[in-house]
Amino acid sequence: QMVVIEIEFDERDPLFKCCCGIFHVKTGTRILSVINVLISTGLAFQLFFFPYNWLWSIIEYSSATANVISSASMFIATFTFRPKMVIGYLATQLIILIFTGLLFTACMVSIIIPESVGRFVIEHLSK
C-alpha cells in the first residue's frame, strides 16, 4: 500500500524568485534556455557560412549541438516538472566551462612564454 505525502508548496513564495524578485525561477529557466538555443543556433549558422579551421569547426558544432539539446531539455523540464532533465544542461555547461578554462590557460601561457607555443601552431597560423 502506497502512502502519498503532500507537502505544502507555495509557488509564489519570494524564495523562488530570481533577478531581484522580478520573476519566478521557472520563467528565468525558460528565458535562459531560449537565449541559449538562439545563441547556439546562431553560432552554428555562422560556422556554416564562414567556416574556419575544420578542427575548430567540429568542436564548435559539437558544442552548439550539445548546447541546443541540453537547453531544449531544460526548457521541456520546466513544463513537465522533471527536474532531472536539467542535469544535462548543467553537465554541458560544466564541460564548456572546463574547455574554455583550458583554452584560456593555454592562451595566457602562450602570451607570457612565447617559446612555449608549439611549432605546429605557429606553422598552422602562419598560413
Image: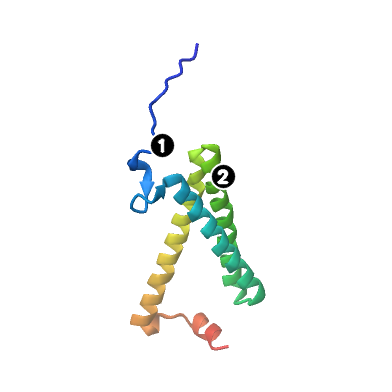
Query: Horizontally, is 37 left or right of 17 in the view?
Result: right
Tell me residue 100's x, y (percent): 44, 66
- Against 12, residue 7 (above or below) is above
Q: Which mark is residue 76?
A: 2
Q: Who's the residue at 63% across and 76% down the image? A: 51
Instruction: Give the mark toward the camera: 2 or 1.
Output: 1
Identify which amino acid the numbered label 1 is placed on: Glu
Identify which amino acid the numbered label 2 is placed on: Ile
Q: Residue 11 carries which label?
A: 1
Q: Who's the residue at 41% across and 37% down the image? A: 11
In what element is the residue under mark 2? Answer: helix
What is the residue that sits farthest to the right in this orientation? Answer: 49
In what element is the residue under mark 1? Answer: loop
Q: Nearer the viewer, residue 63 or 35?
A: 35
Quadrant of the rendered image containing residue 43: bottom right
Mark 1 crowdedness (10 Å alpha carbons): few <14, some 14-19, many ≥20: few
